[in-house]
Image (spheres, rainbow, N blue to C red):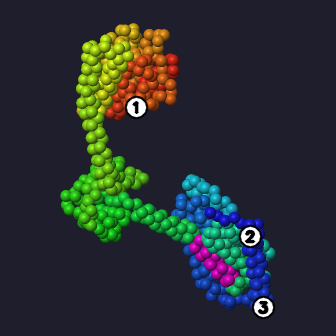
Amino acid sequence: MPKQTSRFETVSSLAAPPLLLLAAAAVCGLAVRVTPPGQIFADPRDYLPVHSILELLSIAVSLMVFSLGWAARRADKGHRNLILGLAALAAAVLDMAHTVSFPGMPDIFSPSSTEKGINLWLLGRLATAVGLVLAVTTAERHWSENRRRRWLGIVGLLTSALVLAGLFHPDWFPRTFVPGSGLTGFKIGAEYVLSAAYVTASSLLCLQFRRSGDRNDLKLAAAAWILAVTGVLLTLYADAGDVFNLAGHVGKACAYALIYDSLFASGVQAPYDALAKERALLRALMDSVPDLIFFKDAQSRYLGYNRAFAAYCGRPESEMAGKTDDEFVPPDIADFYRAKDREAMAAGRPTSNEEWIDYPDGRRVLLETIKAPVQDDKGTLLGMVGISRDITGRKTAEEKLRRAHYDLEMVTAVAAHDLQEPARTIASFLQLLQMRYGDRLGEDADQYIAYAVEGAHRMRAQLSGLLDYTLIDRGDPVFPVVETGTILAEALENLKPGLDETKAVVVRGSLPTLNADAAQLRALFQHLLGNAIKFRHPERKPEITVTASRHDDHWEFSVTDNGIGIDQEYWDKIFMVFQRLHPLNRYEGTGIGLAICRKIVERHGGRIRVVSVPGEGSTFTFTLPDRA
């Protein structure tokens, strides 16, 4: 997180480069007093090789700066590196023209002279100054690729125009050097203006360094400050072979090297460092996961894996790179692994399977393995990634739970079946007792016997319902194709006495053909229709509507009545076993019918719910998958 910068730090950051420049100017002035300007090279031709080498170094570094800025333009968060690169490209071309225009160089385009070289020199310094100032003031904005290319063309055209003007029409420029007199006032003033621009860039970069802590900002600030100092030096020489001229060229080469180092660190080194950190983080995450993680190429050769997989194969990752499963498992298992690899890559999506594996220490575990293909941006298959999780404990627990559930169902079914006979016997003997001794036992005894007989019958009904409930999951798991309209008709036929007695009106919509257990679907309709008849409103005859509608991959059935309705607080409870909302003396029943309905629907892969308005009626809705 960038640190906050105080006002004092801001002022000191902005003031430091100008103060340093003034100090450097004072030192230069003192140097002029102590050592008056003079020629190091008496003959300009002796200075020519040194000048050419220094300029070629600067040109080479400038071109490298442009190459880095252009190559890393897409990875650059803003466009600072690109601006510096474009400025460096312009400076490189202008410096090349400056080099060939220096006194002593062949008259290729026009006669070489000190003044023509100075004109092109100033243009090169101007390009660098503009680049540094723009890089620090506008670099946070994002440029599109079209805009980047457009600016490259603009910089290229503008630079070409300046080079042509400097080479072929030096008379278009103000006088910068007069032989015998030295530098003109325009040249000296231009150098100071450019130095001020460099100082501005250096101050802003120092402030930016204070905020971000990025050492690359400090390198650019130092480069801008050195270029500002060279501008001061280049106002002091009287001849091309002067010491201050040489110092200015050396300073420029050093400044360009700092700019290149900054761009290399931010555009090349920083992404590689970030990539290395991401790889280290990914490796740490992979090794901290207990699951087996591995990568293979399209030929099932290992590319890498985590520490958990290394414990299984017994070999370090580096040893297995480029090798196959044949290195550590028997051929039949290796063939199995490769077959699953090909299956996942051919499917184009993740696939899963279960497999037993043996560890080198003798452990045998069951794995759930998920393999997924890996593709590049163009959809080309690169290989696959696999993740294997130990599910031995989970499978053991699931098996225990399955057995316990099976045992519980068996006990419930047996109890429900076997207890019906004792209940029937109790009811029979109580009724026999009433027939033989009813007059002798008194009126209270007759009432008590009637209660006992009724309870025994109700117990038999509940046991029968419980038996039906436990047997729902015992049916054939493969459902045949059935006509739900036909099944509804059969259910209505079974309920005909109750429908006739209550004068109920049943409206049927168009019902679909789908896969279902016919007997269970018939029971489902009978329970829902039977409830609509049983819980009818006392002041109106029952009206029942049965409809079905298609929704994506399933059908939604609705059974709507105009009965007494259900309070919302009971909408979920009524689907539980032995749940009753009314006393037996008002509505008969076992309290298990809707629980059977829910279990039938869930066995078919659907859901059931109710929406009701007390006093107006209810709508039971259930879904069934469309497998027909």
In the image, residue 190 lies in the stretch drawn in magenta: no
Q: Secondary structure at mark 1?
A: loop
| Residue at x 49%, y 66% (from the top left corner) | 277
Position of 598 with respect to 482 (left or right) is: right
Question: From the image, which quarter does the N terminus lie in?
Answer: bottom right
Mark 3 lies on residue = 34
Q: Which residues are magenta?
A: 245-262
Q: Secondary structure at mark 2?
A: helix
Position of 443 with respect to 186 (left or right) is: left
Residue type at tag 1: Met
Neighbour tally class for label 2: few under 14, some 14-19, many 20 plus, Cα within 10 Å: some
Mark 1 lies on residue = 576
Q: Is residue 534 visible?
A: yes
Residue type at tag 2: Glu
Mark 2 lies on residue = 9
Spatial CA span between label 1 and label 2:
73 Å
